[in-house]
Image (cartoon, rainbow, N blue to C red):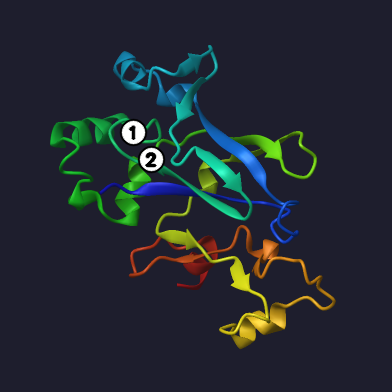
Amino acid sequence: PYPVIEFRIVNNRANCPPGKNEIWDAQVTGIVELSPENNDTSERRNSLPSEQHSTDQKISCDLKLSPSFHPYFCRTWFLRHILDESSPLLKEDVRRRLKERGPHKGWDGKLNNYKDIRKGLVEFTSIRIMMSGSSALSKGEVYAEKTYTYDDVFIGWKFIGVCFEDEDEPNSSQLFRRRRRSGGSAEETKTRVDLSLLHDICPQKGANYEPMAADDETS
């Protein structure tokens, strides 16, 4: 297996009644912008995906995301980019090393720690994630876009859960009951989304995660 970079999209209307919160035939595209200093060799230019667009100041490449299509997007959507030999986010020497190993061997175990993964990443300028689809409420086209920088990448961390069950569900926990809104409509969906947790993350299992700035200051 290979490490992945994960993105999460949350529907702002996730807590609205069914029929009023869905986005039909949603699709996403990703574009990574690389600075000239990361693309000054002909070898790297030739090794980048064919879907690239260059100017004198930058190179923009398509960023493969999976899954890139969601026929019925109503709550949350996780997108993953695989850091393999074809990823434009990896430095040239790492891509070459993975290519020599072959896809059946996956990621190099010697690089399986947050420090080496960080060293293997290109210090990209930006990543743009763009989503489009058709609103079930307005029947019109909807569109959203989010831009990330190199400093937005946290290695060894994952998104925390944002979905919970309403109080009326028989197996609801006390935490979920405290979160239930008063005066909710009977037609509202039982499964709800805490939109305030959209960007919250926590360490993955194990101790091999990248310290945050606050952790560095206290260690």
Please say if the residues under marks 2 and 1 sit with CB atoms less than 8 Å apart.
yes
Q: Name above or below for residue 185 compared with residue 20.
A: below
- Could you tell me which secondary element the residue under label 2 belongs to? loop
- Gap in Å between the C-alphas at discs 2 and 1? 6 Å
Q: Which residue is mark 1?
A: 91
Q: Nearer the viewer, residue 216 or 199?
A: 199
Specify whether residue 128 is in view.
no
Q: Nearer the viewer, residue 8 or 57?
A: 8
- Could you tell me which secondary element the residue under label 1 belongs to? loop
Rendered location of residue 75, percent (x, y): 62, 55
Q: Residue at x 67, y 66 (%)?
A: 194
Q: Which residue is mark 2?
A: 121
Rendered location of residue 130, percent (x, y): 61, 35
Looking at the image, residue 168 sits to the left or right of residue 45; the answer is right
Residue lying furthest right: 183
Rendered location of residue 199, percent (x, y): 61, 58
Q: Name above or below for residue 194 compared with residue 177.
A: above
Rendered location of residue 104, percent (x, y): 16, 40
What type is the residue that disc 2 sits on? Leu
What type is the residue that disc 1 sits on? Lys
Specify whether residue 66 is in view.
yes
Where residue 182 sits, quadrant-wise, is: bottom right
Q: Residue at x 20, y 46 (%)?
A: 108
